[in-house]
């Protein structure tokens, strides 16, 4: 078992490291958000395919059998791709929000530890 002073020293060292961990988690969450928002983009190629499809349909060009089958496959594949992409992206953003919440908890939390350290400092003064 620890004595009271040893326990207080352990609490002080953990309390001092909380702000550093909070900053680390905050930076990780911000980096993940930037990565997800700007660099994860298979949507560009799919959107360009859909724009070419829209150009074909809006202009009223006649479609051959091969073009019609390719349009059907583009629409079917884009629906599947975007459904899976949306689910994964939503889960990733949810993870980023959880990391940010934990970072805020680490930065502002630990009221009991602060009170214990203050009480011990008041007794020893």
Image: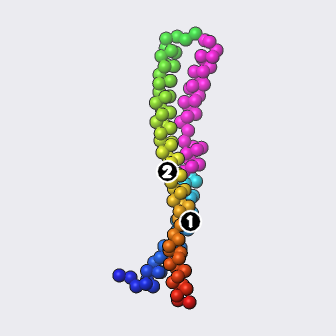
Look at mark 2 in the image and give the residue it sits on.
95
**What SS does tag 1 mark?**
helix
- Left or right, residue 61 beside residue 13: right
Q: Is residue 90 visible?
A: yes
Q: Is residue 13 visible?
A: no
Give residue 58's quadrant in the image: top right
Q: Does residue 95 lie above or below 107 as drawn?
A: above
Residue 59 is one of the magenta-drawn residues = yes
Residue 35 is one of the magenta-drawn residues = yes
Residue at x-position 47% and y-position 27%: 77
Q: How many marks?
A: 2
Residue at x-position 56% and y-position 26%: 49
Depth order, front residue of 98/13: 98
Residue found at the far left of this picture:
1
Q: Does residue 44 lie above or below 21 as drawn?
A: above
Q: Quadrant of the N terminus?
A: bottom left
Residue 6 is situated, as x and y percent measured from the top left of the image, at 43, 83
Residue at x-position 51% and y-position 56%: 99
Q: Does residue 7 lie above or below 100 as drawn?
A: below
Look at the image and give the residue range highlighted in magenta.
32-61
Q: Main secondary structure of the magenta part?
A: helix
Q: CA distance from mark 1 to mark 2?
A: 18 Å
Depth order, front residue of 39/6: 6
Residue 72 is situated, as x and y percent measured from the top left of the image, at 48, 19
**What SS does tag 2 mark?**
helix
Look at mark 1 in the image and give the residue it sits on.
107
């Amino acid at each position: 078992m620890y004595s009271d002073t040893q326990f207080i020293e352990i609490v002080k060292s953990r309390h001092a490291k909380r702000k550093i961990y909070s900053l680390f988690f905050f930076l990780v969450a911000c980096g993940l958000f930037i990565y997800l928002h700007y660099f994860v983009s298979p949507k560009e190629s799919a959107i360009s395919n859909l724009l070419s499809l829209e150009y074909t349909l809006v202009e009223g060009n006649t479609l051959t059998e091969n073009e019609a089958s390719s349009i059907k496959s583009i629409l079917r594949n884009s629906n599947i791709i975007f459904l899976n992409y949306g689910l994964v992206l939503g889960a990733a953003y949810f993870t980023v929000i959880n990391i940010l919440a934990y970072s805020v908890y680490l930065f502002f939390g630990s009221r009991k530890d602060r009170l214990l350290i203050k009480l011990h400092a008041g007794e020893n003064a």
